[in-house]
Image: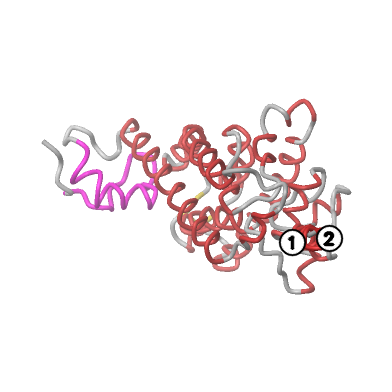
Amino acid sequence: MYAKSTTGHHLLSSQAVMDHVLDIADCYFFTPYIYPVSWPESWAVRQIISLWVVTNLGALLVYLVFGALNFYYVFDHVLMKHPQFIEHQVRKEIQLGTVSIFWMSFPTVVLFFWEVRGHSKLYDNISENSLGWSGLFVSIAGFLFFTDMCIYWIHRAMHHQNIYKHLHKQHHTFKIPTPFASHAFHPLDGFLQSLPYHIYPFIFPLHKVVYLSLFVFVNIWTISIHDGDYRLPGPLIFLINGAAHHVDHHLYFNYNYGQYFTLWDRLGGSYRHPSALLGKGPRDQIRKLTTEAAQTQ
């Protein structure tokens, strides 16, 4: 016997308004079709299970759908001819990525649960922010700056010789990454680098819809910096950490740790101007090898 959706998506727990995604999932799926009547929507155990399901499905959907779109419509498949592109690489990236998402979901759900229970500074209405709309835009800029700064230092720490071989080395197996390498991490490595996204709303006010949108955005951004599209408008080359910057990180190891911007690499002395923009990138190496092979025939 399963419950019909009698409470709708306006149900309030005794501590906080239900998270929007969990609220919708309860209204249209979990309450009418999955959970028994004896499991109330506000019950902590049910919320944790639901959050785990939603987190896994949502993360896999973003990773596989946007990864596939990027791989087939943006990624330059010529890069697969590079001598450092390993055998069955795409399959290995997807295998590692999906396994990582599964294991990362467990600690991630703990943080989502604390948010749902009202322990963060997430809010529903613009009027709840004393700065109104201007506060919303400030929070977006603050989120990008804060997470970029934190991820830079976490990422750099992952390259310490005592840590790298145990965690981050798995990601660097892919010297010429495809979009599917974006989530192909050791689970602990992936979670630690995602931690700033979760910490931010516990420190600073952030609108719930903005938070969800930013969470989707950072996943798509992570896919994009692994997509082999090295183009950037001229002035932005010195500001934005794009795929051209990030492929050099994979190839040369100790450079371009940043997530969105080049700021912290410049301040930390780890900035490297993209080799792909100097005529020395992966495509140039492939052309050189192709030319040499043709001359020897």
24 drawn magenta:
yes
Q: Residue at x 18, y 32 (%)?
A: 38
Task: Tell which residue pokes out farthest to the front in this image.
Answer: 297
Task: Tell which residue pokes out farthest to the right in this image.
Answer: 269
**Residue 192 seen from this side:** yes
Q: Residue at x 45, y 42 (%)?
A: 118
In this rendered view, identify the residue nearer to me: 240 or 171. Answer: 171
Task: Count residues near mark 1 (Cα–Cα under 10 Å), then give few for <14, some for 14-19, many for 20+.
Answer: some
Scheme by which the image is coloured: secondary structure
Location of the N terminus by quadrant is top left
Whole-number angstrom distance, CA of label 1 to CA of label 2: 8 Å
Q: Secondary structure at mark 1?
A: helix
Q: Residue at x 49, y 36 (%)?
A: 99
How far across and down, in percent of the image, does residue 212 sit?
48, 54
Location of the C terminus by quadrant is bottom right
How far across and down, in percent of the image, does residue 37 sit?
16, 36
In this rendering, the answer to whether 230 lies above or below 109 is below
Q: Secondary structure at mark 2?
A: loop
Q: Is residue 261 left or right of residue 292?
A: left
Residue range corresponding to the magenta coloring: 6-35
Residue beneath disc 2: 280
Q: Is residue 116 left or right of residue 129?
A: left
Q: Which mark is residue 283?
A: 1
Q: Is residue 54 left or right of residue 212?
A: left
Q: Residue at x 68, y 35 (%)?
A: 168
Q: Overall secondary structure of the magenta stretch? A: helix
How far across and down, in percent of the image, does residue 132 sit?
54, 66
How far across and down, in percent of the image, does residue 267 sit?
86, 51
25 drawn magenta:
yes
Residue type for callout 2: Lys
Residue type for callout 1: Arg
